[in-house]
Image (spheres, rainbow, N blue to C red):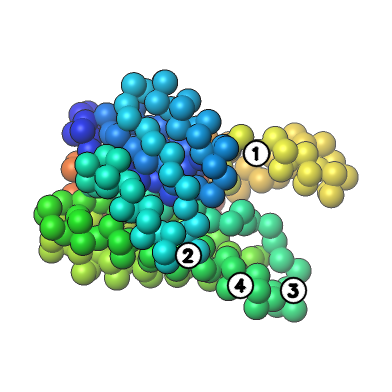
Amino acid sequence: MDLQLTGKRAIVTGGSRGIGKAIARQLALEGCDVVLAARDLERLAAAAAELADETGRRVVGLGVDTGNDESVRALVAAAIEALGGVDILVNAAAQVGGAPTPGVAAVTDEAFYGDVNIKVLGYLRTAREVAPHLVAQGWGRIINISGLAARQTGNIVGTIRNVSVAALTKNLADELGPHGVNVTVVHPGITRTERTDEVMAARAVQMGVEPTEVEQRLTAGISIRRIVDAAEVADVVAFLASPRSVAINGDAVSAGGGVTGSIYY
C-alpha cells in the first residue's frame, strides 16, 4: 500500500531515541522530510545524521524543551523554516516512565507536575503551535504517543498522564477534524528499544533472577507472547500519519501486542 507520504513534512518530538526515533525513521523511509526534536543535542545530531544517511530524506535535528512555551514556539518556527511547512506532528517526548510506584504516599507534587508538564502540557503546547498551520492548509495529522498505563493501575502518575493524553487527543480531534486534521493517540505497551537490555538487567538484579526470566514474566500477559519492537509501533504511526487513515479520528490505537483477558470496545 502506498501511504501517500512522499513529500510530507513531519515534526517528531522525543525523536532522538526509542519509539520517537523509530517513528521518525519510518516516516522518512516513507518519503517524509522530518524534524527530530529533543533536549539532548549531541544524541539529536547523531540521530539526524544517521536517519538522513539511511533514508536519503531531509532530517533535521532541533533542540527543544517541550516543558517550556517559548522553546516550543521556537521549535515550530524553526521546523517550518527548515522544511518549508509542516503536515504531521508526532508527540513522543516524555520522561521515562513505567516503573511501579509503592503507593500514593510516594507520589510527590514535584514528580507529578514534572511528568505531566512534559507529556500532557508538552503535547498541548506543540499541538497549539502546529494546529493553525495544518488548519490553514486544510490537511494534517497529529499523533500522540501515550501508553497502556492509561488502562491499568500500578503507576499513579503514569496512568493519569496517559489518560490525559487520550482526553487531549479527543478534544483536538473534534475541534480540528472539520478542518481536515485528524488526531489520534497510540498506546504502546512494553516496547523493545535500545534501552531494553539495560532495563531488563536492572530488573533482574532487583528481582534476583536472570534477565530472560524477567522478559518471560513481562510477556506472559501479551497475546503475541513477545515484546513489540519500536519499529513495529512506528509502522502503526506511519499509517495514522498518512492520508490513508482518514477514517480514524479521536480514537486510541493500542500497539502492545494485545493484552490477554481484557476486552476494549
* Nearer-N-terminus badge (2/1): 2
* Nearer-N-terminus badge (1/3): 3
Residue 175 position by quadrant: bottom left
Q: Which residue is mark 4?
A: 112
* Residue at image coords 62%, 56%: 97
Q: Position of residue 201 (x, y in %)?
A: 77, 39
Q: Which residue is mark 3?
A: 106
Please indicate whether residue 202 sits to the left or right of residue 130 in the image.
Answer: right
Report how far apart the C-alphas of labels 3 and 4 lie in the structure. 11 Å
* Nearer-N-terminus badge (2/3): 2
Report how far apart the C-alphas of labels 1 and 3 lie in the structure. 25 Å
* Mark 2 or mark 1, whichever is nearer to me: 2
Report how far apart the C-alphas of labels 4 and 1 lie in the structure. 24 Å
Label 3 Cα crowd, 10 Å radius (few <14 / some 14-19 / many 20+):
few
Label 1 Cα crowd, 10 Å radius (few <14 / some 14-19 / many 20+):
few
Residue 107 position by quadrant: bottom right
Q: Which residue is mark 2?
A: 68
